[in-house]
Every structure is written in C-alpha cells, then in structure tokens.
Image (cartoon, rainbow, N blue to C red):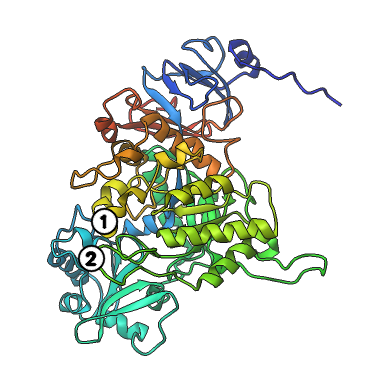
Amino acid sequence: MRPEPAPIDSPGPDYALAMRPDLILDNATVITIDETRPRAGSIAVLGERIVAVGEIGEFRGTEAITVDLGGRTVVPGFNDAHNHMQAFGAGLNEVALHPDRVRSVSELVAAIGTRAAETPVGVWVIGTGYDDNKLLERRHPTRHELDAVSPDNPVLVNHTSGHFCVVNSAAMRLARIGEVPVPEGGVVATGDDGQPNGLLEEQAQTLVRTLLHPRAVADLVQNLGAASDVYLSEGITSAQEAGVGGILGTAEPLELAAYQQARRSGRLRVRVTLMPAVETLHGGAHHPDDEEPFALDLGLHTGFGDHWLKFGPVKIFADGSLIGRTAAMFDDFEGEPGNRGYFQMAEATLHRLIIRAHRAGWQVATHAIGDRAVASVLDAYEEAQRQLPRTDPRHRIEHCGMCRAEDVARIAALGVVPVPQGRFINEIGDGMLRAVGSRHPDCYRQRSFLDAGVPLPGSSDRPVVKGAPLLGIHDMVNQRTADGQPFNPQEAITAEEAVRSFTLHSAHAAFDEADKGSIEVGKLADLTVLDRDITAIDPAGIADTTVEATVVGGRFEYDRVGLSPSS
C-alpha cells in the first residue's frame, strides 16, 4: 500500500510547483475567510481545486496560465443559502410589477392590461413582484380592477413575498373559487360585499396554481439557464434551492429531472443544493427491523449527489410572512387587534412531520417567520433529538424573522442554523417595522446570532427581493430601510462578517464547509473577483461594488473585463 503523503502545514511555492497547477491568479487582494491566513496575494489552481495560497508572484515560473488581476479583490464564491432559482428564472418572462416599476394599483393594473392586449384570448397573463406595502394606496389590487383590463384572459398577480396572489374573475371561474373547499392553512379573502375579492392567502393559492403547474421540463431548463446567467454576473457560485417539487400551490414532479438536464446541457452553471418540499416525501415498504422511511424513492435523503447537484434538507412551511401579517406571532400585529397570524397546518401535524423527517435522516429546513412559529419549530427539533439523538443534524429555520432572546439561546444550544435574509432590511424593512412596531429588536437578528456562536448564513429568498449578494451584504452592515430609516442598528455586523455569512457560513448550512466557503488548499476553486475591497471602504459604498469575474471550479464562467485566459 502506498504511504499517505506527509501533511503540509503551510503549502508554499515548492508545493504549488510540485502539484503542477494549471491556473494562477496573481496580483490580487485575496480575502480568504481562513482564520489561519486571512489575506493573500495569489492563488494556484489545479483542475477544480485550490492547491496553494500565497503571496504575489510566489507561484510564477510554473507552466500554468497566469492571470494578473491588477490588484482586484478576490473572495470565496458567494453562496445564497435560500433562494428560488427556478421561480426567479420564470419571473424574467412575466410582467414585472416590482416597486421600482410599479408605484400604484393603477400602474399595476395598466401593466397587466398592456400584456393582456397582446396575449391571445384565454391565455394566462402572469405578473410578479408587487408589494402592497409600497403601492401608493397600500393595498392589494382587486379582481374587479383586473377584470376591467383583462376580461377574457385569466390573470394571476404574484405578491413579492410569495405568500399571496391576486386573480381576476376569469381565473376564479377556472379554479372554481367559491365552489371548492379552501385548503388548510389558506384564506380566500372577501370584500365588503362578502364575496371573494381575488386575494388568495398562503395555501389558498393552490386553488389557482394547480392550473398552471406542472411546467414542461424544457421550460424549467430554460428558466434555470436564465437564472444561472444572472447569478454568475452577481458573483454567485452556489445556491440552495428552497423547495423543489412544489411549494405554496406549485407542483413540479419533474423538477429534479429539469435540474439534471440543465446540468447535462451546460445551462446550469452554478452549484445547487436542492431542498425537496415535504409533500414529495412518502413512506414505503421496508424490512420489519427498519423504521418506515420518509423519503424520496429508494430512500434518498440529505447528502445524495455531487458537488454540482445534491439533496440538502427537506423544506417544510410553518407559517406565513411579516409584511403580509400572516406569520404566527405571540402578540397582535401592530394596529390589528386580534391578528396574530396563523400556522399553515396544525402544530401537531407540523411537529409530526419534523420528527418523522428527522428520524428518516433528513436535515430539516422549516420556514418560520413569526416568533410563535420559531419557538414551536424549536420545540419540535428538541423533541426529535430527544426521541432519536443524532450527531449534528444541523436543522435549519428558514428566515427566523422574529426571534426572542430566549430562543436565540435555544438555537445556539440545539445547534440549529437560522437563515435570515439581510436584503429584507432594505427592500421590505419598512413594511416589517410597521407590522411589528415596538417589537422590532427581535426582527431579523444578525449580531445576536454571531455573539451566541451561531454561524449566520447569507441568503436572499430571491425572487422575493433582489438577490445580488453585494446588496445583501450592504444591508447587513448598514441596517437601513428603503425609506432611509434605521432598521436594527444594534444587529449590524462588519463587512468581513457579512462576506463570511455569504461564503463559509452558507456552506456550513449545507454541510459543505469542507469544500466551499473559504480560499484554502484542497477546496473548490469557486471565486468571486470584485473591483474593490469591500472590507476597507466606507460601508455606504458596498452596494456600488462591481463583480468583475466569477470563477467556478477553476473556470471563468463570468468575465466582465476580459480577465479570462480565453478572452
């Protein structure tokens, strides 16, 4: 048997030469996110892996192609720990109703009318991204307003949160709204006349979305390709897809096949961790000595796959949203006596699903935004570990929007990973502050988690908000809403901590810290090249930083300024 090579404590130029790297990135400011060597000037790459990290010029003289980065900053590739890649790609073809496009209900309705006028009769018109909190009237559109501009085409207008949609009368007729039962965890809103006004909350969206899904695999592949192109331009090399197979009324039984086809065809150009929706799991035949499975076919669960495409946690919904005031809270929403939101299923059912998934070997990622939902999910995680102790299950709470101080301590003690979204602070922060009032110190904590020793991933929940990591980093540091109001200044973190969130801590959330998240020997050469060192500038300028290039597995997949050897 061949002896293992002796470990190298600090690989230098001799080691790099011996490894015969094929690419050297030189003359850079390298922020490694490696505590043993925080800064460097050069990186040597062989194939997909980093083989040495050193000082400027240290590896010259090899036969490798050398790229002079001209002093630019290199950070580990950004990793969005919670996004909806396929939905984002689909939305690129829908009517854009985001706050920077639409400022009032009348403008929203006009935009739908313009698309309806050029759409064949009977074909769906879909809009996406509106936020009632940012419309002039601060309300949702109604079916009657949509009817006025699209009487013959069914219309579906998606709220930016994903927790609401509005439909017109043509869509309501197709969905038989008013005739069929409303799903548990959903509400069909009514107007002053007591009749449905077109607004569907949470699981009630299923009534309409089942008419639009599943999509063709070819369409899903196209959406993933379009999303990949955008992600690479923003420095994203890895993304964690929060709900494969269908969430909040969608159903995509062939979504994994679409990801595989996109990867084979070269359209999926970033690494993806897939979180299957809990609805896709099922029991099955098993030996009497084995526990009943709760898994995908053949018992697949967290960890199956490779560095490009793998299964991560199972995704479960506990409650709704803050800006929609449907999150499960201990206290009333501000200005709405009696409204404390609601769970999307009975708490006993939620706990049973979590415990069953835990026992089947899954990492569990539960959407919980209200403080009552967060506490309830922690109860379930604690009970799951009591029933079947597992070493480092690393269960997650997606969003963890309202979190009491005592639950921060519980998260740390249980080893749970909270996955909040820094970009929410700016884009929907004003609406969140209005919803929670004086309880805002509990809202979207960051510093509290880090101070408790909890790794803090970086994520966007795209397409709920703009997903560029640099925007999220900016907001995590600056803590300002779109209206310029301070959000939670006491929860601010430093720029370097925010970079660590979007790199190493996001990798940790998916059990990938051995391969991703820092610039170290042996790790994947997933790198983002920036035009400036965002840890050394006025924090107010972080959002103005430009991604110059994105490297995935040692290959330049995005190159804005001609740095690639093939340029």
Residue 437, label in figure: 1
Question: Number of labelled discs?
Answer: 2
Residue 335, label in figure: 2
| Left or right: residue 69 compared with residue 488 | right
* Distance (Cα) linking label 2 and label 1: 9 Å
Q: Are marks 2 and 1 in contact (CB under 8 Å)?
A: yes
How crowded is the residue under tag 1: few (<14 C-alpha within 10 Å), some, or many (20+)? few
Q: Indicate whether 225 appears above or below 479.
A: below
> Which residue: 67% across, 17% down?
8
Amino acid type indicated by mark 1: Gly
> In the image, residue 503 lies at what x, y percent?
47, 36
Decide which of 209, 475 is in the foreground and name it.
475
Q: Is residue 516 visible?
A: yes
> In the image, residue 176 lies at what x, y percent?
36, 86
How crowded is the residue under tag 2: few (<14 C-alpha within 10 Å), some, or many (20+)? few
> Which residue: 56% across, 33% down?
524
Residue 227, label in figure: none
Callout 1: SS: helix
Q: Indicate whether 403 appears above or below 190.
A: above
| Left or right: residue 190 compared with residue 76 | left
